[in-house]
Image (cartoon, rainbow, N blue to C red):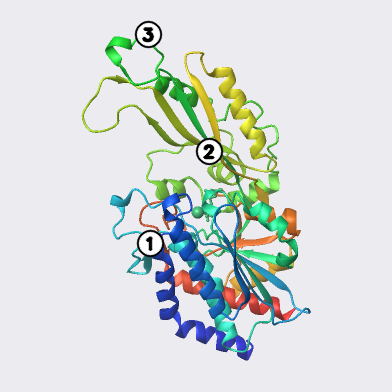
Amino acid sequence: MTDQLTAALAYAQENQGRFLEELIDFVSIPSISTDPLARPDILRAAGWLVDKLQDLGAKNVQIMPTPKHPVVYGEILEAGPGKPTVLVYGHYDVQPAEPLELWESPPFEPQCRGDYLYGRGASDMKGQMMTCFNAIQALEHTGGLGVNIKFLLEGEEEIGSPNLGQFVQDNRALLACDLAINPDTGMLGVEMPTITYGLRGLAYFEIRMSGPSQDLHSGLFGGTVHNPAQVLCELIAGMHDAQGRVTLPGFYDRVRAMDSDERKELARLPMGEAFYLEQTGVPALYGESGYTVTERVCGRPTLEVNGLLSGFTDEGQKTVLPAKSMAKISMRLVPDQDPEEVRQQMAKYLEAHTPPTVRWELIKHAGSFPSITDRQTPAVVAMSQAMEQVWGKRPVFKREGGSIPVVVHMQQHLGVESVVTGFGLPDDNLHAPNEKIHLPTFYRGIETMVRYFCILGEK
Ligand code: BES
Ligand code: MN
């Protein structure tokens, strides 16, 4: 171990309390990107990051506007042109915290209980981002960095990064780099460092059905008017067949098959049926027949109903024939599916199957492309080494069922691969009540990033 590495690791160890306090401060900002009322908090989180980057010694720190939420940029280029430039990606926005009554402590008043810090964004991904910042700080305080760093911190990931592709394209020169580090995924278990080499894409829609011009008495009109709730439910029911396959026309046409080597590798991951039964508490699992659960999450597309609304749902009863119904539906995509093509498939399905008794509308929300990243790049090999130094074992490689749109933007516009990894755990309750981060793993994450930047800097 070099003297600097020893000193930086000691610094990281000694400052754990301070790092935790900073994380608590960051997580207290309710930067919910989908909520228009949270705009001031989005800007507050961006401002918080500006202070943080300046504190790290970054130069050219700026809040760069986009049509919606701004990007925070900064750079530490003191290692010089002979050294690699790493683009550190992060997102400072979070998902909504509802249902609030299920939180044991308020989502934006982070609380430590046992080994965990609870709060919305603690794991996804304010804590994850902080592992990079804290590692950079440790290195800066013990002799400086051997790599150049650029920061690209966005506020729209949780709504599908609608403006980031354009932003990256427009700022190609500013963002030019050798590799990107994207710590927005996680590990399969506390003792299982993990590198993600694939992510699913997303095509998110809202379907609105309308029938009569207003709610009707179900006795006076039942039998004469087609109920939009019924119509929508029948359409949704028809979106899967009995084998759990999605029925939209052409949906599987572009799906790349997993080869037998990959299927063998996926079979070795400790995420079989027992894992999912335990993580979810369901009485039995469901999914496309012909594939294992791991394959279904990693390498097959799916369709989910994210929300349904119609008629009377308060306490008590009301005999009503609702005027409208609405569903939020999203599809997770795998290479080489295209979110725009999937929109057309959904529109075709609705055109073909919606009866003439109602009107329908298809509204498009997030669309993002699926990705596969190269597992052999020097940047991935370096991460694998850093993880082996911390955990005493090699990381596992997995494909993730979730989505991170920027990975494809960076491939397309910057020509760089991302090292996608992270220190979250499967039971962190992402997007759910009581989101938490496991602090011992967070500290190991900081150590990993210290070692990672050192390995990259040696080259
Ligand atoms: N960090 C997650 C993605 C993720 C979750 C990776 C779990 C690995 C494990 C990310 O912030 C996320 O939730 N993305 C959204 C993106 C979507 C709105 C385009 C997602 O996957 O739902
Ligand atoms: Mn998320």
- Residue furthest to the left in view is 316
Q: Residue 247 placed where, x, y %?
A: 58, 26
With 223 as the anchor, is 369 left or right in this view?
right
Residue denoted by label 1:
119
Amino acid type shown at disc 1: Gly
Q: Looking at the figure, which quarter contains the C terminus?
A: bottom right
Q: Is mark 1 within 8 Å of ligand 2?
A: no
Q: Residue 13 placed where, x, y %?
A: 47, 83
Residue denoted by label 3:
224
Q: Earlier in the sequence, mark 3 or mark 1?
A: 1
Looking at the image, do the residues carrying marks 2 and 3 touch, with CB atoms under 8 Å apart?
A: no
Residue denoted by label 2:
330
Helix, strand or loop at mark 2? strand
Amino acid type shown at disc 3: Thr
Q: Is residue 353 above or below residue 459?
A: above
Image point (64%, 76%), residue name: 453
Residue 281 numbered tag:
none
Marks 3 and 1: which is nearer the front? 3
Quadrant housing residue 220: top left
- Residue furthest to the top in view is 224
With 320 as the anchor, is 417 left or right in this view?
right
Front residue of this view, candidates 275 and 212? 212
